[in-house]
Image (spheres, rainbow, N blue to C red):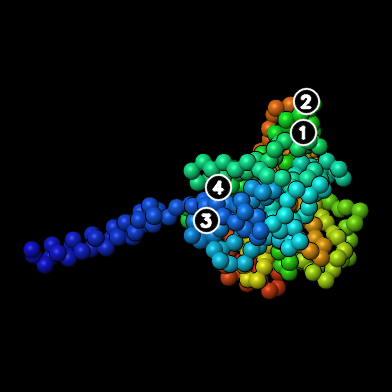
Amino acid sequence: MPQGVKRAIIRAMLKVAPFLLLLTMSATAAVKIVKTSYQGWPNCYRITNGEVELIVTSDIGPRIMRYAFVGGQNFFKEFPEGLGKSGEPAWVARGGHRVWAAPEDAVRTYAPDNGPVHIEIKGDVLEATEPVEPLTGLEKQIVVKLSPQGSSVEVLHRIRNAGKHPLDLAPWALTMMAQGGVGIHGFPPRGKHPEVLYPTNPLVMWAFSNLSDHRWRYTRKYLMLHQDPSNAEPTKLGSFNKSTWAAYSLHDGLFIKRYDAQDSPKNYPDFGCSFETFTNADFLELETLGPLQHLKPGASLEHVEHWTLHKNVRLRKFTDEELDGAVLPLVSAR
C-alpha cells in the first residue's frame, strides 16, 4: 500500500477515535440501583453511576439520606441518634432530604414519616412512596433519576391528596446540609436606579430572624448563611427568584440545587417565597417551594429540583466577584 494512502487512513482513524471513545463510554456507563444496608437500616437502595452515589432508605421516609462522590463526604446532615431507627410516634429530624407541604403548620407539617415506604425501580429511576398519612390524608413521593455520567440528579417530588376534602398547599423540598459549610443563594438580576424602579423580589423574615446575626452575609448579588455548630440560635430568611438556586460550600466541595419557578411570586407561600434557608447549631437547610395550589381529592402536584456536585471549588472571600467566577457558571450549566 502506498505510504500516502496509509497516512490518509491513519489521519482518518485519528479523527474518528474520540467519537468512538465517547460512544464506548456512553455504552458502558450505566446507573446501578442496588439494595443495601446503610447506617443501621437494612432496607436501603444505593443509586450510583460510578462517580456519585445516593442512598434512599425504605425503612422510613421518603428520604434521600446521602448524596456524595463515591466514597466521599456526605453533603447531607445525618443525626446519629436517629440513624437506623424507625417507628417513633413523633416526627424525627434524622437528616437528609425530604418533601413537605407548605405553609408550615405546627401539627400537620410534622406528620411522622417513621414507617416503611414502597420502593419501585423502573430502569434507572427509583420511586419512593409513603403510605397515606393518617394525620393529613397526603401521599408523598420522591422520584430519583441520576444521569449516567457526571453528578446531575433530577429529583421529582409528588404530593397526592388522598383525603375526602380539597386542600390548599404548596410543595416544599427541604435539604439538610452537613455542619460547617456556607449556604449561598442568588438574587434575581440586579439593576440600577433610576433605570429599574420596580421591586424585583421579596426578602422575607420570620419572628426569629435576626439580620444582625453574624452568620448572615449580604452582597449586591447574593445572600449567604454560615452554618456554625457553636451557635444554637435558629434563624431563617426567604426570597424569590424565577430561576431559583442555592449552593452549599463544604470543604472545597459544592452542592447545587435548582428549581424553575413561575414568573411572579404572587402564588407562592410565605409572602412569595420560592426559596428559604434555615440554620441552627445542628444543620443548615436549603429549601425550595412551589406555588400554592387548590388540590382536589385524588389530585396531585409535582415539584422538580435538579442537583449537582462539584469538586475543588475553593471559596474563600465570598465576594460577588469570586461567586460570579466560581459558582455562577456551575449553576448556569444545564
Inspect the image, locate mark 4, and give the three-letter code of the amino acid beneath it.
Answer: Lys
| Residue 8 falls in image quadrant | bottom left
Mark positioned earlier in the residue sequence (4 or 3):
3
Q: Is residue 244 visible?
A: no
Q: Secondary structure at mark 4?
A: strand
**Dots 1, 2 in contact, CB < 8 A:** yes
Q: Secondary structure at mark 3?
A: strand
**Residue at x-position 83% and y-position 41%:** 108
Q: Is residue 18 visible?
A: yes
Single out the residue that lies furthest toward the right.
207
In front: mark 4 or mark 2?
2
- Expressed as whole percent of the image width and height from the top left, the position of residue 125 reads 53, 44
- Expressed as whole percent of the image width and height from the top left, the position of residue 190 reads 72, 55
Q: Which mark is residue 48?
A: 3
Mark positioned earlier in the residue sequence (2 or 3):
3
Mark positioned earlier in the residue sequence (4 or 2):
4
Inspect the image, locate mark 2, and give the three-letter code of the amino acid beneath it.
Answer: Lys
Judge left or right: residue 27 versus residue 318: left
Inspect the image, locate mark 3, and give the three-letter code of the amino acid beneath it.
Answer: Thr
Between residues 118 and 21, which one lies in front from this camera angle? 118
**Residue at x-position 73% and y-position 31%:** 161
- Expressed as whole percent of the image width and height from the top left, the position of residue 196 reads 76, 50
| Residue 79 falls in image quadrant | bottom right
**Residue at x-position 58% and y-position 67%:** 72
- Expressed as whole percent of the image width and height from the top left, the position of residue 257 reads 65, 54
Task: Check disc 2 and report the residue beneath it.
Answer: 164
